[in-house]
Image: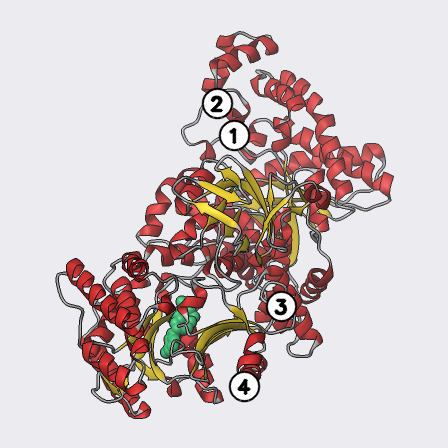
Amino acid sequence: MSKKYVYLFSEGDATMKNLLGGKGANLAEMTNLGIPIPMGFTVTTEACNKYYDDNKTITQDVIDEIHTTMNKLEEISGKEFGGEKNPLLVSVRSGARASMPGMMDTILNLGLNDKTVEVVAKETGNERFAYDSYRRFIMMFADVVMEIAKQDFEEILHEMKEEKGVELDTQLTAEDLKELVVKFKEFYKSRKGEDFPQDPREQLIESVTAVFRSWDNPRANVYRRMNDIPSSWGTAVNVQEMVFGNKGDTSGSGVAFSRNPATGEKKIFAEYLMNAQGEDVVAGIRTPSPIEELDKQMPETYREFIDIVNTLENHYHDMQDMEFTIEEGKLYFLQTRNGKRTAQAALRIAVEMVEEGLVTKEQAILMMDPKQLDTLLHPAFDTAEMAKHDVIATGLPASPGAATGKIAFSAQEAKERHEAGENVILVRQETSPEDIEGMIAAEGILTVRGGMTSHAAVVARGMGACCVAGAGSVKVDEKKKTMTVNGKVYSSDDYISLDGSTGNVYAGKIETVEPEISGHFGTFMGWADEIRSLKVRTNADTPHDAAQAVKFGAEGIGLTRTEHMFFAEDRIFPMRQMIVARTEEARRTALEKLLPMQKSDFKGIYEAMEGHAVTIRFLDPPLHEFLPTQAKEIEELATELKISVDELNGVITDLHEFNPMMGHRGCRLAISYPEIAEMQTRAVIEAAIEVNEEMGWSIVPEIMIPLVGEVNELKFVKSIVKKTADAIIAERGAKLTYLVGTMIEIPRACVTADEIAKEADFFSFGTNDLTQMSFGFSRDDAGTFLKHYYEKKIYDFDPFAKLDQTGVGQFVQIAVEKGRSVKETLKLGVCGEHGGDPSSVNFFHDNGLDYVSCSPYRVPVARLAAAQAEVRNPRKK
Ligand code: ADP
Ligand code: MG
Ligand code: MG
C-alpha cells in the first residue's frame, strides 16, 4: 500500500504530533473531544520532507490525495469548493511539530474568486462581508504564495481610506471594497504579469506548496536554530473550513490562555475583537477587548467559551493557548496548544498544578523549559534606583525582566549596534516576524500598539526577553529616529529602561540587582533536587563566582582554572619572570612569589564552597599568552625584568607556536617544568590543610591534570604531585585526603581510558577541547566558517554549545566504558560548557556520569535538566 500523506481531522489524535504537526494533531484531538471546530484535513510533515527530497516539487500522487480528501471535506460540509451554490472556503495553515509562532503564514478565505464572491454575497445577504473576505484573501495569497509584499496592498487600502475620508477599515462600504478588489487584482497582475488565479484547486495546491517552501525561509531558520528544532522535522499543512469572525456585530475572533501567561495566575486570560478575522488580534491592528466584555454582549457564548477552556486545560494537564472565532453568535475553536509563558508564570503554574492535584511533581518538572530559567537568573532593577527615575510612559507588562539601553528604531539598527557592543532597546510601532533578529539582539522591546497577545509580546515571552507592549502615549518616528513622549523628544543616544513586570518605561539608565531563588522558584528547584541523580557542580575561578554558584545550588566545583588569576595586575609580573627564567633556579625563585598568592586564592575558594568538593586544574594554556605583543610593552617589560629587549624577544620567539591550542600546554608544561606542578600542589594542599583546621571541615581537594593523552604523562605528573603533597602532609602532621585525576579531552585519552583509569582517581571530560580535537577545528577560528555550515544545513547546531552526541558523544561513551571496566567506582564528571546545556546534560545522565559542572548562572538550568533526564530515564530504583 502506498503511504498516506493526508489525514482528515477525524482520522488523527494528539499522539500523532510528529506526523501531523502540533496544530494538526491538536485539531484532531479536539475533534475527538467533541469541541466545536471547523472540519478539515492535514497534509503531513512527511509530505513536506518528500517535497524537499523531490527537489522542491509536490508530486502528483500527493496532489491527487489532497484533491480526494478535499472531495471528502466537501461531502462532510455539504458545500462545494468553488461551487456556484454554497461555496466551501478554507484556510491553509502551517503547523510544525513544535509551535513556531508567527514564523509561517496563514492564508484565509481560500476558494474565493470573481464568481464565488458573488455567491457568498447573495447567500449571506452581506455583500460587504464577501468583498472584505475577498480582498483579504488576495492580499494574503499574493504575500505568502507570490511574495508580493503585504505593505503594498496595505498602502492601496490606506489610499482608499483617505480618498473616502474614513479612518477604520470597517467604515468602508461594500461598494468601496468592490473597488478595492479590482485595484488589488490590477496590482497583482502588474506585478505577476498574469491574472489572479481563479481556480480554487490551483489556489489550494499553490498555497500548500508555499507553506512547505516557507519551512526554509530565513526567519524560520533563525527561529529553529535558537530553539533547537532540526530542519528535518518539516511542517504539516492544515486545510480547514473557514468560519467568519468578520460577519458583523455578532461575530468576532480572539485569543485565550487558560491561565495568565505573564504571571501564571489561575484565571482565564483572553482578548477578542468584534467583527474581525483572527490575524487582526495578533497583528495588534486594533486594541482588543478583555473577554469579560463578552459576558455582557453574549452571555451564553461566554459560558460555553469558559467551559471549553476548562475542558481543554484539564484534558491536556497544562496551560492552554487557544484561538477562537465567533460566527454570528456561534463559537468555534481553531487551535489549542500548551501556551508559551514567562519563566515566572511557568514556575507558578507548575507548582500550583501540583498543589491542585492536576499533575505530579515529575510531570511538573517536565513542564518547564530549563533554558527559560535563564531569564530569572539575571538581574532586576534596584528598587531604590528605580525610584529615582521618572516613569515616562506605561504599556502592558508583556514579558517580565528589566532592560536598560539606548534606543534603536529598527531591527536592523538594533542588530548592528548590539554587534558593535552597545546595549539597545528596540522601540517599534509594532513588531512583525521580520524583526526577529533585532528582537534577539535587543535588551528589551517596547511597542506602541498591540495587546498582550501581539507579535512582540508572544515572541518576547518565548525568548525570555523583557517587553512592554502597547505604550500608546509614545510617538515613534522611525525615519527621523526619534521617540516623543509628552512633548519630550528622545533620540538614539538616550537611555531608557523597561520594567516588563509592570509595563513601566523610565527615562535614563537604571542599575540592576542580583536575582534570588525563592518562592515558587525555590519550591520547584527543591523538587528537581529530590528527583535528580546527576550532581551539579560549577566552574569557578574566584571566591565571588564560587559563592554565587553555591547560592544557585552548586554542589561543588568541577573546574577551577589556575591561569586566570595570573593575569591579575599584582601577579602577571612574577608569572612573566617565571616564564623568561632560563634556569630551574630562576624559575623556582619566581614560583616562590606566586605560591602565597595561589594559596590564598585556593583558601578563599574553599571557604566560599563551605566544605564542598573543589577540583583544581593545573596550569593549562600555552605560556606565550602571558607575554605582551606590542613593541612598547615589550620594551617596558624588558626594563622591569632587567633583561635586554633582544633577550625578551628571543623568549617570545621561542614560545611562538603555529597551533598553540595543540602546542606546549596542559600537562606538557608540567613535564617540561615540574617545579610549576610542585608549586601548584603546595598551594592546593597547604590551603586545604589550613582551611580544614580553621573551619573544622574535611575538604578533599581534587587535583586535575589537563590534556593527558597517554597514561605515562599522568603517571609522571602524578608522581610529582604525590611526592610534594605527602611530604607537606607529613611535615605538618596533618590528616588530609586528596585525589589526583585527569581531564579527558583528547581522543587518544578516550580510547586508552582503561590504561589511564588505573592512574586516575577521577575523569573530568573537557568537552570543549574534546570537541575541537574530534572535529579538527578550533573554537576560536570556527566561528568564521561554521555560519556557512548552518546556511547550507551541513550542521544544525553549534557543536561547542550543544554536544555532538553522534561523534564526540561516542568518545565520551568509550571512555566511560573503558574507564569503569578497570575501576568500577571511578568518579566521572564533565567540566566543559556543555555541562550547562540541557540536551547535553540529558546525554551525560543517560551515560552514567556522576556530575556536570557549568558556569554559576547555568547551575539551576543544569539542576532542572538533570531532574528531567531522571524522569525520562530513571536511574534511581
Ligand atoms: P499561526 O500559527 O501563525 O498562529 P494560524 O494557522 O493559527 O497561524 O492562523 C492564524 C489565524 O487565522 C488564526 O488565529 C485564526 O484566527 C485564523 N484562521 C485560521 N484558520 C481559520 C479558519 N478555518 N476559520 C477562521 N479563521 C481561521
Ligand atoms: Mg495560531
Ligand atoms: Mg581543555
Circles 4, 1 touching at the beta carbon (< 8 Å) = no
Residue ID for mark 1 = 622
Label 3 and label 2: CA atoms lie apart by 51 Å
The amino acid on which the numbered mark 4 sits, given as a three-letter code, is Glu
Work out whether residue 790 or residue 678 is closer to the camera in this orientation and state it.
790
Local SS, label 1:
loop
Q: Nearer the viewer, residue 243 or 485?
A: 485
What's under tag 3, amino acid-wise? Ile
- Reading the image, the residue beneath label 3 is 365
Vertical relation: 644 (above or below) 552: above
Left/right placement of residue 600 relative to residue 326 reads right
- The answer to whether 763 appears left or right of 356 in the picture is left
Q: Which residue was labeled with disc 2? A: 655
Q: Are marks 2 and 1 in contact (CB under 8 Å)?
A: yes
Sequence-earlier tag: 2 or 1: 1
Task: Give me the C-alpha separation between circle 4 and circle 2.
Answer: 77 Å
